[in-house]
Image (tube, rainbow, N blue to C red):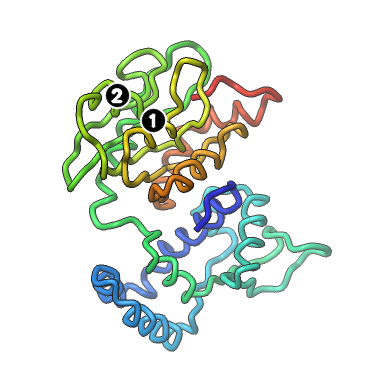
Amino acid sequence: MNYMNPIVVNAHRLLRVMVDAGKEEWSTYETEVALAMKNKRVSALQRLNHQFARDHGSLIEISSKRLRELSGLRPDDINDAIAWLEDRDAVVVRSENRCDGPFDFRCVQRVTFKGKYLFHEFGKGTEPRQGDRQYMELAVEEAKKSRDEDGGPHPRVGAVVVRDGKILASAYRGETGPGDHAEFGALEKKLGETVVSEATVYTTLEPCTTRHHPKVPCAERLLERGVRRVVIGMHDPNPNISGKGFLCLRSAKIVTELFPADLMGVIEEMNRDWTRAYRATSHNLPVG
């Protein structure tokens, strides 16, 4: 999936919400799906698609209110994401639009996602891998420790570097110096002499793509260090960065994935004041 812009990121997030919300319906298949993925058995995944479709009509429903609560997205963002998914035949609206004019998420009672598409995304590896959650949660805990270097709003960011199931380092914003980004603290201050190629980095905020010279943007630093995979908690609200961190990493063939919806919500709530500051001002605040 292409993470080039926030609409695509939000569409992916809605799919993840549906996977979480619909687990009771397809939990009986979870073990089989995991085994098929592990063994890269495409035929087995296709069989499960057909079985799920037979048992549940290949559809998972959710109320509009619940979808908004679980995703934490604004209605306009949900509208854009649903339109993107509808173009790809991944979602259908199963209730009558109560408003005149173009589709508006706030005017329908329920939204239905096609279970086959959810399995398709799950089979491609967009779901967190086994063991990921503990590292994501550690990154969130690190983010809570973040230190501000001045009186202005700054993000709460945590990063964890893992290779072969072993935690190499963890860091939070401001831990290793005033204004130090979490990725910089972990990769340079703590692992400057350690080979981190093939490692996975869990970071609660989309890596920045611009810094004031001579500082190096975090996305560029991740490329330089040769990490294999980056798992991100939320996209950056700064319009000069939002989506560009994802694109930079994916263009370099680095596997780029997202935290599950519930942890995204925790991270976004943690950064609510910082995000609000961007939306309330007409100028850009300092990067990270």
Q: Nearer the viewer, residue 235 or 99?
A: 235
Asked which quadrant contains residue 8, the reply is: bottom right
* Nearer-N-terminus badge (2/1): 2
Residue type of the residue flagged with mark 2: Glu
User: Would you place residue 137 above or below residue 214 in this image?
Assistant: below
Label for residue 234? none
Residue type of the residue flagged with mark 1: Arg
Q: Secondary structure at mark 2?
A: helix
Left or right: residue 46 compared with residue 273? left
Marks 2 & 1, CB-CB < 8 Å contact: yes
In this view, the residue farthest toward the right is: 101
User: Would you place residue 39 above or below residue 69 in this image?
Assistant: below
- Residue topped by disc 1: 221
Q: Position of residue 204 (x, y in %)?
A: 40, 37
Q: Position of residue 156 (x, y in %)?
A: 42, 28
Identified at 71% across, 62% down, the residue is 107
Q: Secondary structure at mark 1?
A: helix
Q: CA distance from mark 2 to mark 1?
A: 9 Å
In this view, the residue farthest toward the bottom is: 54
Label for residue 188? 2
Q: Position of residue 31 (x, y in %)?
A: 25, 73
Left or right: residue 154 compared with residue 100? left
User: Would you place residue 57 above or below residue 73 in this image?
Assistant: below
Callout count: 2
